[in-house]
Image: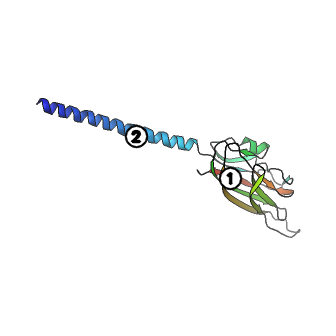
Amino acid sequence: MYVWHLVLSSLNKFAVREASIGRALGVITRCIIVVHFCFVVGFTVCVHAYAAEIAKGSPILFDTVRSNYGVDVSSLKTSGNFTCTKPGLYLISATIRSKTNAAYFAVYKKNTAIVYGYTAEHEKTDTFQHSGTIQCVKSFGQGDVISVKPWKTIEVNKWSCLTVVMVK
């Protein structure tokens, strides 16, 4: 009888330990998920105004935040620059809408163009807005600066947007 008591007692302790391990694993899994999402960075910012003229080499100011996850994007409204706070691999997409004929622009890492784009070439009598979209995947370190700049003075219109997402 005493042996059965020891066996049952041991099994009970094992079951309690198993349940504790299961609960602990659940807590650890939830913590890993929370930590992962704490390090996720992503945003979409757009130009709200109609027809803002941007000088050659000046960053485009994105004044409307469409979405924002885990990062301060206020500098995009004032300086047109986004400073990376977390190193990683980023997907960048920029769409520029303009009436300017062949409105060339680029995404910059610090002062180096990393991907180039332009809006359609058209006749001077064409009053329609055209858009150009560029994308790239690039590794950025903490403190790296991302911006979108035209190669010549261009008119940038509403719905021009920049999206930056940390993918790894």
Residue sitting at the far left: 1
Residue plotted at (83% across, 58% down): 151
Residue plotted at (53% across, 40% down): 35
Q: Nearer the viewer, residue 87 or 12?
A: 87
Q: Which residue is disc 1 drawn over?
A: 163
2 or 1: tag closer to the N-terminus: 2
Estimate the x, y position of residue 125 in percent, counting from the top left.
88, 69
Figure quadrant of the N terminus: top left
Estimate the x, y position of residue 147 in percent, counting from the top left.
75, 50
The quadrant where residue 69 appears: top right
Q: Which of the two marks, 2 or 1, is nearer to us in this view?
A: 2
Q: Nearer the viewer, residue 127 or 43?
A: 43
Q: Which residue is disc 2 drawn over?
A: 25
- In the rendered view, does 47 fall on the left or right side of 38? right
Residue plotted at (84% across, 57% down): 155
Q: Considering the numbered disc 2 on the image, is that residue within a helix, a strand or a loop?
A: helix
Query: Distance from label 2 to label 1 (Cα)?
Result: 36 Å
Image position of 4 with respect to 110: above or below: above
Type of the residue with mark 2: Leu
Type of the residue with mark 1: Thr
Estimate the x, y position of residue 144 in percent, counting from the top left.
71, 46
The quadrant where residue 99 appears: bottom right
- In the rendered view, does 84 fall on the left or right side of 122? left
